[in-house]
Amino acid sequence: IDKNPAQPEFHQAVKEVLESLRVVIEANEEAYRKDALLERLVTPERQLLFRVPWVDDKGQVQVNNAFRVQFNSAIGPYKGGLRLHPSVNLGIIKFLGFEQIFKNSLTGLPIGGGKGGSDFDPKGKSDREVMAFCQSFMTELCKYIGADTDVPAGDIGTGAREIGYMFGQYKRIKGVYEGVLTGKGLSYGGSLARTEATGYGLLYLTEEMLKCNGKDIAGKTIAVSGAGNVAIYAIQKAQQLGAKPVTCSDSTGWIYDPEGIDVALLKEIKEVKRARLTEYAAARPGAQYHEGKGVWSVKVDIALPCATQNELNLEDAKTLVANGCFAVAEGANMPTTIEATEYLQANGVLFAPGKASNAGGVATSALEMSQNSERLSWTFEEVDSKLKGIMVNIFHNLDEAARKYGMEGNYVAGANIAGFMKVADAMTAQGIV
Ligand code: NDP
């Protein structure tokens, strides 16, 4: 904390991981201390901070701050998304990069941890302005990334449009056509099922977690927050599995639709028109629109936070429990505060942490990297079935890790331990680097 003041989200992520690793660390204390393994684990290998100047539609020069944190490459090239949101700062990117190390390890695929982004806000900008920003951003970032070194992807505010502009600029400057970014369009190296992967993967893991606890997802009512990439495809897959998601939200308000969210309408409003959720309520007479936050006040069986960090706090957790909610699985990164997580677990709620339950996105990004390397495209069904296999496997790995260390049912600890062990082994084997 002394070394990194004013990075509360990073401290929160580190605290959660290290506390649940206590038993593993104590068992290996001497070896880890000798190699300063934990100090190295919480210190990024490299942090890049740079300015991004670009010209807006009025001819004014705008300047944004940008970051790429290359956190840990013990098990593969750095991999993690690029967040474009006004709230982005170094601490946020470090928390996301740190989480990414364990998430990527849990997928079982050879990818290290990294994250990046900028405080640029794509909302309300013209396509030309977004392109100008993306080109300037990549003009600097391209010096530090590559298909075998660091492979960024999308995140909040970075979708197919932004990835396209960045890929074009990378290719133009470097003169190589390689899989340097994932989440690409299908016409230039993208993978089928990548768009759906995080939301679908969240539901595959949730379904398995319920099944292993004697419960069935079919017929259950679900609260989802967010209305972006993760939320939309979580809602879609939940419906395919026979459940009924009744809420979604964005940064200004939220929807309660007792008949179940109309995914086609939501996609049209968010993916095509890039509009607000007020339009959803206007088009669905049975749905209610509310300003501000509130999806966790609805009586549901399952909650899936899919918007952003710390969006489900202790009060929300108490309301969910009082309403009979029995499972929470995180689609976003660290959406549940530590106090809320502890309260949910203490009250018998099945809790899947984001680093496990939203790992389907990065896992499918790694499958995109494989397809790019062999210059082949797999079918939707092939990618989707690999994704499902990976998510089911992740659940069993963290379930077993929790049991092995006497914390049965604590999937937070299980995920941290399972993710950590592989990275720690690789770091130890590679010496003091
Ligand atoms: P999108 O930008 O597509 O959607 C984000 C959604 O969350 C939007 O509805 C947005 O509303 C809302 N939101 C964002 N910030 C805030 C905020 N500060 N307060 C309230 N609402 C907010 O992002 P994604 O769906 O891709 O990402 C959502 C979460 O999932 C993030 O935590 C991300 O890191 C995580 N994630 C994403 C993966 C992916 O593959 N996309 C993979 C793994 C994790 P509005 O439009 O009004 O801003």
Image: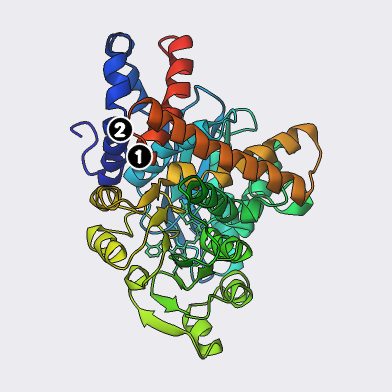
**Residue occupying image coordinates x 42% and y 49%:** 333
Residue 20 horizontal/vertical position (percent): 30, 32
Mark toward the start of the polypeptide (2 vs 1): 2
For mark 1, give the secondary structure. Answer: loop
> Residue 328: percent from the left, percent from the top?
40, 55
385 on left or right of 276: right
Q: Nearer the viewer, residue 13 or 329?
A: 329
User: Residue at the spot x=49%, y=85% of the render?
Assistant: 281
- Residue positioned most to the right: 376
- Residue 19: give x, y in percent of width and height: 26, 32
Q: What kind of residue is marked 2?
A: Ser
Q: Residue at x 48, y 22 (%)?
A: 422
Q: Residue at x 66, y 53 (%)?
A: 164
Label 2 crowd bin: few (<14), some (14–19), many (20+), radius 10 Å: some
Q: Answer yes or no: do the residues labelled 2 and 1 have beta carbons within 8 Å?
A: yes
Amino acid, disc 1: Asn
Question: Looking at the image, which residue sits at the far bottom?
Answer: 285
Q: Quadrant of residue 252?
A: bottom left
Left or right: 424, with 154 as reference point: left
To which residue does mark 1 refer?
410
Distance between mark 2 and mark 1 Cα atoms: 10 Å
